[in-house]
Image: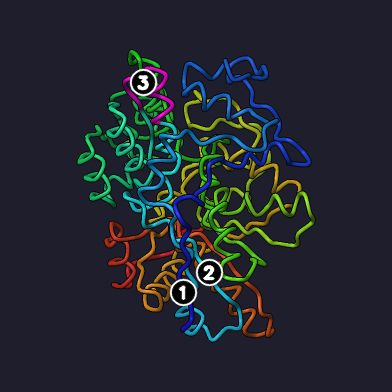
Amino acid sequence: MKQKRFFLEESQIPKQWYNIQAEMPNKPLPIKHPGTGAVMGPEDLYPIFAEECCRQELNQKDVWIDIPEKVREMYTYYRSTPLVRAYGLEEALDTPAHIYFKNESVSPVGSHKLNSALAQAYYLKQEGVTNVTTETGAGQWGAALSYAARLFGLEAAVYQVKISYQQKPYRRSMMQLFGAQVTASPSMSTRAGKDILTATPNHQGSLGTAISEAIELAQTTPNCKYSLGSVLSHVSLHQTVIGLEAEKQMEMAGEYPDEIYAAFGGGSNFSGIAFPFMRHTINEGRKTRYIAVEPTACPKLTKGKFDYDFGDEAGYTPLLPMYTLGHDFRPANIHAGGLRYHGAGVIVSQLLKDGLMEAMDVEQLDVFKAAELFAKSEGIIPAPESGHAIAGVIKRALECKKSGEKKVLLFNLSGHGLIDMTAYDEYLSGNMMNFPMK
């Protein structure tokens, strides 16, 4: 009988995260103060983020960083996540390619986001912080941090991008069920929100606007800090537990990936699956391709420019060296709310600039067509974000069918789509449309 799923024993779950910054041929450029342009150190970030996260953010020395015992204990409640051989999808495509996916949808909140939320909430609690603010697009990160905050006794306030707040009411309900206060962004509750709505009264929101509001609330609330679910380097660090597990599981399967795919918004799930494998490319010259798949409606990697830019719309964040469409870019109202972000993380941006990874963009209808085929062949309804990775893999698998190449393809199924059925309803009814970049 063919083995389909691969799990690790509890003792095999990683005890350390992998810090790719320490081994990159070209280190990421420094981040800069939003007002003065001066290079910032960890202590300059302390007023906003957990102090340990600030140290991790700029750590370009230590290859391995210990996972706190309490965080790893909480990981064991749902990790290891399964590595799955997608025999059904292979058969549906009639491809000689071998397709594997790392199923992060089995976490308590249904996505990979909990891997960093637990770590960040732990560090905030250890520091004595009582309140945490954040932003969220589709709601995967907001749900993860709301849950992690509840576990560590923190009060959470979440600014959800307005269009996703409307499109995905059950994600909002999840956050509220975990005890978080959820506000549609832009809102009238912050100066940043008021300014945005004054300029554009019908603004449907973006991750940039929501970040601005969350940071402002953190800065004006006693004993409160801000937490981010993607883009920043410490978030990518925490997510490497995904790829470190996948390495061991691929070895159990007796194969090694020729190509690795992941959806791309700010970089968290791409970093998580790709970085641990990429160290073999950097250190040993292993010929693996790493492909980030983004929406055509928000193509910062394929059509953006490498520059210093703000991580938010109002200009509260440090200036980050990244591929960007501009911090005031307003993405179309696609259903993959977690990918509607104007910029890419500094590590990924440097890796793309150096040619160590690739990027491709796909249209919304192609994403849902791919997600439908995956659901029919594997029995899992993927989040629209994950559908981008699936679309990339399907395109490559069909190329393998034509050429006869027997490639091993691995992708990260970053979350399930069981709370995204309004999007699938729109697709199935024929009312969904593509949105070229504005």
Q: Which residue position holds label 1?
A: 4
Q: Amino acid at mark 2?
A: Tyr
Q: Secondary structure at mark 2?
A: strand
Residue lying at 49% horizontally and 44% vertically, measured from the top left: 341
Q: Position of residue 180 (x, y in %)?
A: 25, 34
Numbered label tally:
3
> Is residue 20 rendered to the left or right of residue 8?
right
- Marks 1 and 3, how far apart at CA: 52 Å
Q: Position of residue 271 (x, y in %)?
A: 57, 48
Give yes or no for contact between labels 2 and 3 (Cβ–Cβ under 8 Å). no
The reply to whether residue 167 is visible in this rendering is yes
Q: Which residue position holds label 3?
A: 191
- What's the magenta region? 121-132
Q: Secondary structure at mark 1?
A: loop
Give yes or no for contact between labels 1 and 3 (Cβ–Cβ under 8 Å). no
Q: Which residue position holds label 2?
A: 100
Q: Secondary structure at mark 3?
A: helix
- Residue 269, magenta (yes or no): no
